[in-house]
Image (cartoon, grey):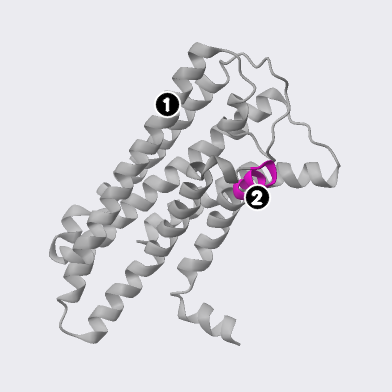
Amino acid sequence: MFFFLLNLALSDLGSICTTVPKAMHNSLWDTRDISYTGCAAQLFFFLFFIAAEFSLLTMMCYDRYVSICKPLHYGTLLGSRACAHMAAATWASGFLNALMHTANTFSLSLCLGNALGQFFCEIPQILKLSCSHSNFLIEIGLTVVSPCLGFGCFVFIVFSYVQIFRAVLRIPSEQGCHKAFSTCLPHLAVVSLSVSIGIFTYLKPPFISSPSLDLALSILYSVVPPALNPLIYSLRNQELKAAVWR
């Protein structure tokens, strides 16, 4: 669990450092400029860390499923080698996803200006500036494929938690049930927060869309989940609870 938490912390730190420092710099120096290569790099790293984070959350769900539903097989199914391979697969999938989207997005001809309606570079805002129809359709297809893969991960998480809760409810002791639930609740809270914000941001009805709302939602999904994840997981630490209470 702590190995995956380390990887999750790195992805949170990476996604925060991709967008927030540049936004702070622009605010302090009263500028809104970003270079073309800087915009491409920002988009690549943001997609890389976000995709890796959701893959890590899926792996962490599998870790909890094995530890609760198949505890006697835990050492076999999730040894150090298996965990390293799973972590490598998540980072590799994030890298390929980011590379694919960034390469195709920045192959578009941007002929409708160079002003983005966000505080960082993201695909929907860049597509609004494009007039290249063929690559535009390719990017739309890629943008549909990624949520489908994410939906597959979400279905896996839901199915795993159904099995987990069935196993937990069969535990005879109240202390055992409480321990199992306390292990799962932080992960479930992080997944719910990330999924709910992402769904509302990209699937909200068009009639409630506005530039100010889109800006607020982009801040919400790019900054809030990575900032809250360490706090949510730290609530299981008794020393931190005592310090906060004091």
- For label 1, the residue is 142
Estimate the spatial distance between the alpha carbons at disc 2 and disc 1, rounded to whole Å.
25 Å
Local secondary structure at mark 1: helix
Question: Is residue 58 something one can see in this rendering?
Answer: yes
Three-letter residue code for mark 1:
Leu
Q: Taking the image as drawn, is residue 84 in sight? A: no
Residue 55 vertical position relative to residue 161 in the rendered view, above or below: above
Q: Quadrant of residue 69?
A: bottom left
Which sits earlier in the primary sequence, circle 2 or circle 1? Answer: 1
Q: Main secondary structure of the magenta part?
A: helix
Picture coordinates of residue 157, whole percent (x, y): 29, 53
Q: Is residue 215 magenta?
A: yes
Residue positioned 41% across, 67% down in the render: 186
- Looking at the picture, does residue 170 appear above or below residue 108? below
Question: Crowding near pointer 1: few (<14 within 10 Å), some, many (20+)?
Answer: some
Quadrant containing the C terminus in the rendered view: bottom right
Of residues 168 and 72, the one drawn nearer to the viewer in this rendering: 168
* Residue positioned 57% across, 31% down in the render: 124
Q: Which residue is mark 2?
A: 216
Q: Crowding near pointer 2: few (<14 within 10 Å), some, many (20+)?
A: few
The image shows residue 176 at horizontal and vertical percentages of 23, 80
Give the extent of the magenta segment: 210-218
Q: Is residue 220 left or right of residue 63?
A: right
Measured as percent of width and height from the top left, residue 228 is found at 54, 62
Examine the image and state in which quarter residue 119 appears.
top right
Residue at 13% from the left image edge and 65% from the top image edge: 72
